[in-house]
Amino acid sequence: MACITLQAACVQFPIYNARSRSLKSTIARHAVGATIGSRPNKDIVVVNALNNITLALRPGDRVGIIGHNGAGKTTLLRVLSGTYVPTSGSAEVIGDVSALTDIQMGMDLEASGHENIIMRAILLGMNYQQARALAPEVEQFSELGEYLDLPVRTYSTGMMLRLAFAVTTSIQPEILIMDELIAVGDASFMEKATQRIKTLIAKANIFVLASHDEGTLKRFCNRAIWLNRGELAADGPLDGVLAAYNKASHQTVEE
Amino acid sequence: MKSATQDLGQALKAWRIWVLLGTNDIRQRYRRSTLGQFWITATIAITVVGLGIVYSAIFKQSIEQYLPYVAAGFVVWFLITGMITDGCRTFLDSEGYAKQLTVPLSVYVLRAWFRILVTFAHNAIIVPVILVIFLVPVDWAFWLFVPGICLVALNGFWMMLLLGTLCARFRDLPQIVSSFIQVVFFVTPVMFRSDQLPASGRAVMDLNPFAALLAVARDPLLGRVPSPLEYAIVIGMVVFGWAVALLVYGKYRTRITYWL
């Protein structure tokens, strides 16, 4: 069964400016010693993106992540998907994860739609046979028809998104992670896409969505995690956390 | 180190991904050109023939002897330097994937490694052609190029893993490395022969690891069996290099995504 467990997970980003990123300056610092008017590591700024987060996601959890810009939502999503390993504490992710954050990742503009379907499917962990078997379904869903034989660079932005969406969502992950709900295409396609996302969410063991939109959160989530400056401000049933979050936001506005 | 080997083991299992990304890197570069990826072959053929004609005159050597020497030399040299210079950019170029896919990071090293081996295969086409044109005799020693290339590829991989990790952190290391490689080129017998050097120079050459690396893969192509010393240096590099690279990668593996 899929589950995610974070134990006192912290994420600290070292922000190296151009100076401290260079080997030369590191050597220079060591060679000169730290005496000449500069403190060691002075130009490394550390951003505490996440601080001491402990939480457990279990099957059935539909989690909405809320918080202001820069509160650490995207960083938390990356920790939950396993691409960021916490700098201290631990994160254990069991189950296959699909993070639909950048659905156009790795799209080759010179390659045809068909080639891109295969590529994308392989990146998502399929074998070539499965990837080829996927093609007809994607073709039908994306409604791109003969365009799939043309290079993707000839597509409109909407068509490109439709293709990316059709491939990425054709795999049912155990853990589904999204940064804002994906919205693609014109009205009729949007309806189809929303339907598909709904099924994907319904079948996923764990679903995590970072969003600013209360309506979306209420529609898809049953639990909420409120992040404030990298700290876990609240974790619990959606309605309660949302109410607390809104109250706090209003207070800051009034102040 | 254990975590590094596990990471690498998982990456090897995800071969479909790095084979795909590696091939695609090459396809992307040569798409819409008539010769396609055989531009790689054409480019090295032009380089080698041009250099062969000019430098055989400068060094007063017969072209029948010099051209095969330079061709084999450059094919192997480009393999070695390709791994080193591209190695620096492995993680930097894979940032978009690394922040979204949950595959181990060494997949991206394998991607670049595979790409360079494919490029090498295209370059290597010119060697048999030139050997046939100049009727260079081929005996059993020729086949020693197979273990030779394997040793170069194994050495290349640890260099890529190590340099990729360090270059993600220190952004001017790629420039340092590429100027270093240029200097190494002039002290490594790619264009000249080490027997053209005076005895003292040859002694120094024996200690140049790049000369040994070049020799184990190139010399068999020209019918010379590499010396035990050359094999010893290259095998020593494999053992020592892999140990260092795995240690460094194992230690900083989880930090690399933060540096990108």
Image (cartoon, rainbow, N blue to C red):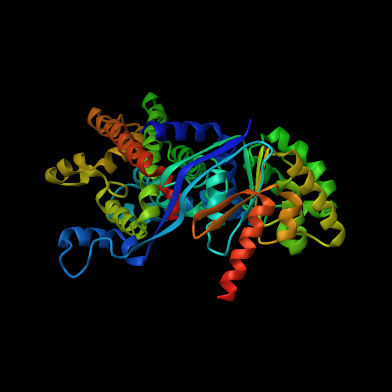
Above or below for B250 versus A145 = above
Locate residue A205, reporting x and y percent. 68, 37
Q: Which of B33 and B164 is in front in this view?
A: B164
Q: In this orientation, which residue lies closer to the viewer: B204 or B49?
A: B204
In this picture, residue B29 sits left or right of residue A141: left
Image quarter of the N terminus of chain B: top left
Q: Where is residue A249 in the image (x, y as percent from the top left)?
A: 60, 67
Total count of labels: 0
Where residue A18 sits, quadrant-wise, is: bottom left
Would residue B227 appear left or right of A208 to someone viewing this image? Answer: left
A1 or B19: nearer the viewer:
A1
Residue A182 appearing in the image: no
Picture coordinates of residue A96 (x, y %)? 62, 36
> Is residue B80 depicted above or below B35 in this figure?
above
Q: Which residue is most to the bottom?
A: A255
Q: Measured from the top left, where is residue A231 in percent x and y?
A: 49, 55
In the displayed orientation, state which residue is furthest to the left: B200
Q: Can residue A230 be seen in this view?
A: yes
Question: At 29% from the left edge and 43% from the top edge, which residue is drawn?
Answer: B210
The single residue placed furthest to the top in the displayed view is B140
Quadrant occupied by the C terminus of chain B:
bottom left
Residue at 77 percent across and 62 percent down: it is A158
Residue at (82% x, 42% y) in the render:
A136
